[in-house]
Amino acid sequence: MRDPASPSSHGQSREPTGESSTGRTASDRCPGVFTPHPSTDGALARVRLLGGSITPEQLAVLAHVAAQYGDGFVDLTGRANVQIRGIADVDAVADALVDAGLVPSTTHEKVRNIEVSPFTGRVGGLADLRPLAHELDDALRSDHSLAALSGRFLFGLDDGHTDIAGGGTDVCAVARSRTDGSVGFDIVVDGEIAGSVADDSAVTQALLGVAHDFLEVAGSAWRIADLPESARGDLMAVTRDRLDPPLEPGALAPTAGDPRVGWFDQDDGRVLLGAVVELGRLPARLAEFIAAVEAPVVFTPDREILVCDLGEGVAETVVRVLAPMGLIFDAASPWAQVSSCAGAPGCSRGLAEVRADVSERVESGPPVTEREHWVGCDRGCGSPREPHLRVEATSAGYRRTHE
């Protein structure tokens, strides 16, 4: 298995458990590339993408790996990452992904959980956060002690769309517009505005500072929301002392926007195409065709696929060629509102063949009128952050509740 820091070396992963630093008694079972999850249908590897962004060359590698070593699909996740299931040769997959630059660290592989507003720098927003995302990722990977964070701890960068800040991050910077037209950033900790920083140059330090403070009090907690009330209060107090007053005090008001599906005019005059696929599973062959467009791609926390920076003629060709192959550009499609976990038989905990049942529901059931997420057990893997109808398999059938 190849080490990203030393392309010619092979050996075991150096992924730390973080137990000695945090006091967690259980190991971090969040899957990665070097520590895949042993599902009943084969190993499952999760690839963490910075803000969901991937180059066409990297997407082509993912498609090849999924077709040759996996089950033929690239699964999209609720954190804008991707997964490959059914892997038999874990080392071959790891080597291919490392060579493609998709796993830039062994020690910090599973803590590179950074969500970014998907439209940032292209459609609306108060700032282009792509450079800041790279700065945060570089600083995170350079900080040895932060390798002790769990694979569940989530950073966020919100460009003012409020599509990330209200989405369950542990710590998030959200761009705010001042009366003089300049842009500052409120720092949101576990959904609560703790304070602000003057500009983007102070964001990385503020976010990583919260992560360090969390590790000091983490104990057995995986995320800030897991902390005892007293420890969470202490963390918030320390954070507030370091920050300026909030730019927009009060409760955070996330915006429940429409699906990012369809044709969007970018601020620079080019075109962005948003699409979804059935069950949030991108067939390897379709991924190859998307990569062949030779355009940047962004996966979103809502399992959408954004093909960016297109000329109008190219965009029209993409729709004409890829729509018949299964890329859905219609925001009214039920697949823009329905998602699911893997369910049985791929997951040993699954009490039903969720994907088959979801497909039947979409094809022959009543119209989809709200966000739905179907799950095979009480874990509720992949559940969306916004209000939704949860359809959970039980031993007595499906139970429907609003979350």
Image (cartoon, grey):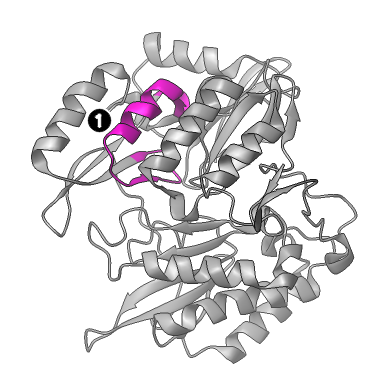
Lateral position of residue 140 relative to residue 125, left or right: right
Is residue 373 visible in the rendered structure shown here? no
Lateral position of residue 236 relative to residue 11, left or right: left
Residue depicted at 53% across the width and 12% down the height: 356
Residue depicted at 66% across the width and 84% down the height: 237
Query: Circle 1 is placed at which residue position?
Result: 329
Asked if the stretch drawn in magenta spans residue 280, the answer is yes
Lateral position of residue 356 relative to residue 378, left or right: left
Range of magenta residues = 278-305
In this rendering, the answer to whether 228 lies above or below 78 is: below
Please state the horizontal and vertical placement of residue 271, each as a whole percent of the image: 16, 46
The three-letter amino acid code for the residue at tag 1 is Phe
In this rendering, the answer to whether 208 lies above or below 162 is: below
Of residues 319 and 347, the one nearer the viewer is 319
Asked if the stretch drawn in magenta spans residue 81, the answer is no
In this rendering, the answer to whether 338 lies above or below 22 is: above
Residue depicted at 24% across the width and 57% down the height: 122
Is residue 131 visible in the rendered structure shown here? yes
Query: Where is residue 362, by image quadrant?
Result: top left
Q: Tell me the SS state at disc 1.
A: loop
In this rendering, the answer to whether 193 lies above or below 372 is: below
Please state the horizontal and vertical placement of residue 284, each as a whole percent of the image: 45, 24
